[in-house]
Amino acid sequence: MSTKRESIHGQWSNRWIFILAATGSAVGLGNIWKFPYITGENGGGAFVLVYLLCIAAIGIPIMMAEVLLGRRGRQSPINTMKTLAREEGRSGAWALLGWSGVIAGFLILSYYSVIAGWALAYVLNAGSGVFTNAPAAEIQNIFAALTASPGQLIFWHSLFMLMTMLVVARGVKKGLEVAIRFLMPALFVLLLIMVGYAISSGDFVRGLRFLFTPDFSKITGEGVLIAMGHAFFTLSLGMGAIMIYGSYMPQNASIAKTSIIVALADTAVALLAGMAIFPIVFANALEPGAGPGLIFQTLPIAFGSMPGGSFFGTVFFVLLVLAAWSSAISLIEPAVAWLVENKGWTRIKASAWCGFATWLMGLGTVLSFNEWSAYTLWGKNFFDLLDFLTSNIMLPLGGLFIALFAAWVMKSSSTADELKLPENGMAHTGWRFLVRFVTPVAVIIVFLNAIGVV
Ligand code: TRP
């Protein structure tokens, strides 16, 4: 029976390790770098509300579906989809869903690594004390100088890619378990300290109002799409990352409970990051819609003026790098696992090739901030396009098909069995209703709305 299948790549020691690993994957640049800047670009409160609704109505049910598929298939997403589809008497073409996930992961990691490189560079900046008492304009210059230099960006991008592939080569389990036990709690505490600073020295009330007072005149169809795309991105959904982590999950752990814990932790980190950043934005008359540089242009102001700022700044960027690191490995793990399963490659060889290809692709993002910044399509440069294509199109589409598979292809008895919920009980029926109807319809409406059809 399928429930006895075992992963050839090993298993998490217990359910807490799964929670830590999934949280490690979910919490990353998406929460601390991306969430604040897209919130700023899309007008604040209304965007945040749509994002929260998407987490609850789309994100959590799809996360449960992904974990469930992964644990039942116990292989890389490509092979898991193929196996499960055959088991239900359907076409092996469902493996295409795994393929699109592998491509999405590769594309996302290619730019993710460049941004994580900024965080690496900022560890050094914070440590060297350049932020101390620096005015906002000076801090903006530091950021501009970094992004204007392809050489520096390539250096940090290469370093981050190397770090990522080292962990992946060792095997996610061995490579990851140790690092994440302390990392996530430490990041959380540091964010609390930053919020404390924002309360005492920033324009906290205005920051909160910006984040939590919805003004629907400020959000567009594209804004709603971005909010939904971000719900997928921030929870690592829609490309098989959570599916493959699910494939290492012990058989007895509750999928519903763990998914909810991961989603809550992830959301808490994003909201804390927003509460730390916007009060500083307003107190220093900065632009909330400043774009991808937002946290790199705001938080250093705080570090520059708070007592012990060089220390806190260094620790903060170290933790940001670690959070990005534990996310990055999940983006490439499905590809590496597939190469090991199907091509018989060693993990080391598979990691090296995947890492090299991703690194090469990342050069496009590096150049989009300088040499290529003038080349745009629909007002978006190479990096923006890559992010838009992956977060707002590929991930929601992947999620849509995951939902369709879990709720329309898999029998109700199979999903109840894997979720360990009584088939006709409230929890299972409610979940099935969400993934059968609510999630697919919501995703489709948001797509149609964004292209102006509804
Ligand atoms: N969720 C991570 C973040 O917020 C990024 C990430 C890791 C991801 N794995 C993923 C995004 C898989 C999409 C799909 O930073």
Image: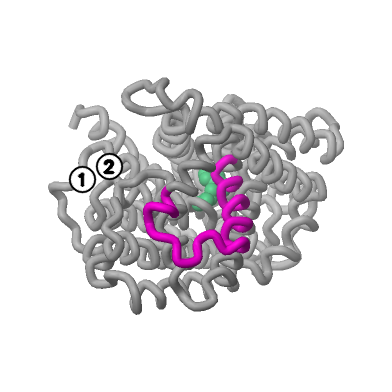
- Asked where in the image residue 350 lies, by quadrant, the reply is top right
Q: Which residue is drawn at 30% across and 43% down?
A: 442
Please report contact status of discs 1 and 2: CB closer than 8 Å, yes or no. yes
Q: Distance between the residues labelled 1 and 2?
A: 6 Å
Relative depth, front residue between 82 and 107: 107
Relative depth, front residue between 308 and 61: 308
Which mark, residue 223?
A: 2
Q: Which amino acid type corresponds to the residue marked 1 in the rendered image?
A: Ile
Name the element at disc 2.
Answer: helix
Relative depth, front residue between 77 and 88: 77
Provide residue 345's location: percent of width, then percent of height: 85, 32
- For label 2, the crowd category at 10 Å Cα-Cα, with few meaning under 14, some 14 to 19 and many 20 or more, is many
Q: Which amino acid type corresponds to the residue marked 2 in the rendered image?
A: Gly
Q: Is the magenta stretch mostly helix, strand or loop?
A: helix
Left/right placement of residue 175 relative to residue 431 reads: right
Name the element at disc 1.
Answer: loop
